[in-house]
Amino acid sequence: MASTSPALTLYQFELCPYCHKVKAGLELKGIPHRRVEVNPLNKKEIKQFESSADGRKKVPIVEFNGEVKRESSDILKWLDEAFPGGRQLSASGDDLARAEEIAAWTDKDLIQILPTVLYGTWGESIKAAKLTAKTSNFSRVDNLKVSMFGSVVMKMIAKRILKKRGEGNDGRALFEAQLDHLEGLLGDKSFLCGDAPNFADAGVHGALTCVREFPAFARVKARPTIHAWFERVDALRRRVDAA
Ligand SMILES: N[C@@H](CCC(=O)N[C@@H](CS)C(=O)NCC(=O)O)C(=O)O
């Protein structure tokens, strides 16, 4: 399957949790794809695409056989339709309702507070900018600009979230609260809806993969139930680069 499928392109920011959701889905299904890192300052790599409904140019964007797809949750649900073989990420019946609920929590709560642990301190913010630079093909000048402006902007975003949620200077308590919720969702199940992963697992796993290189990931590792689930899903993910 891997070598015969036409190439899919994912336009992304390396530290965008919504993009990580899509990556998790692609890898869980073993779909070959190419990743294009988008320069957040000029977004020139996605200038050929129309803006999102709110008038902004946002990632993730997936291009496949001339079709353009956006919205991470919609993309995750479209994957089984476009690639019917292999692992199914769709859910049905009670599982569907539960998976939808978890997906909504992922976008509305879990992902919303991630900037506070990705960019909460200057050290984290600079690390984030460096990670982006490492995965991009930007020129040295653009890399420098992204690092400088990116760190400042991201730090401001993190500060605004902390202020809004009344958590002072520390995103860790916010993150722990989300992990408490995830622990409750998992209970003693292997995956979020039972014995097999679906789009809910892809979304949460993707979101947490975003913080994998950051100190906050130690909080994930410190929770045996979540860590075991994280590793379980991770073992099923397969990176397949398009030829
Ligand atoms: N609801 C969208 C959210 C995508 C989104 O907000 N992407 C951010 C990066 S994490 C973005 O592209 N922001 C650029 C902008 O708003 O100009 C999805 O799930 O795909």
Image (cartoon, rainbow, N blue to C red):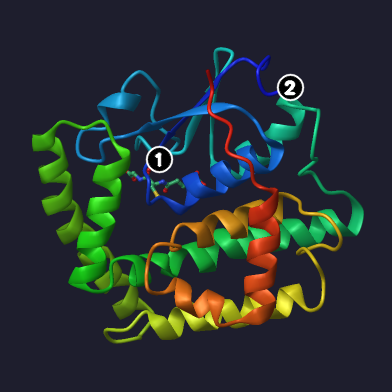
Other residues around mark 2 within 10 Å, as few (<14) / some (14–19) / many (≥20): few
Label ID, residue 1: 2
Considering only vertical position in the picture, is 123 above or below 39? below
Relative placement, left or right, of 33 versus 102 is: left
The furthest residue to the right: 93
Q: Which image quarter: residue 53?
A: top left
Q: What element carries label 1?
A: loop
Instruction: Quadrant for the N terminus, please.
Output: top right
| Some atom of ligand 1 lies within 8 Å of the CB belonging to the residue at label 1 | yes
Q: How many labels does the image show?
A: 2
Considering only vertical position in the picture, is 142 above or below 46? below
The furthest residue to the left: 141
- The amino acid on which the numbered mark 1 sits, given as a three-letter code, is Asp
Q: Which residue is drawn at 62% across and 72% down?
A: 227
The spot of residue 191 in percent (x, y) is: 77, 63
The spot of residue 84 in percent (x, y) is: 80, 28
The spot of residue 89 in percent (x, y) is: 76, 44
| Cα distance between the residues tagged 2 and 1 | 37 Å
| Some atom of ligand 1 lies within 8 Å of the CB belonging to the residue at label 2 | no
Label 1 belongs to which residue?
54
- The amino acid on which the numbered mark 2 sits, given as a three-letter code, is Met
Question: Which sits earlier in the primary sequence, circle 2 or circle 1?
Answer: 2
Q: Which residue is drawn at 36% across and 71% down?
A: 117
Q: Is mark 2 on a helix, strand or loop?
A: loop
Q: Which residue is drawn at 55% across and 12% down?
A: 66
Considering only vertical position in the picture, is 22 above or below 95? above
Depth check, mark 2 against mark 1: the one in front is 2
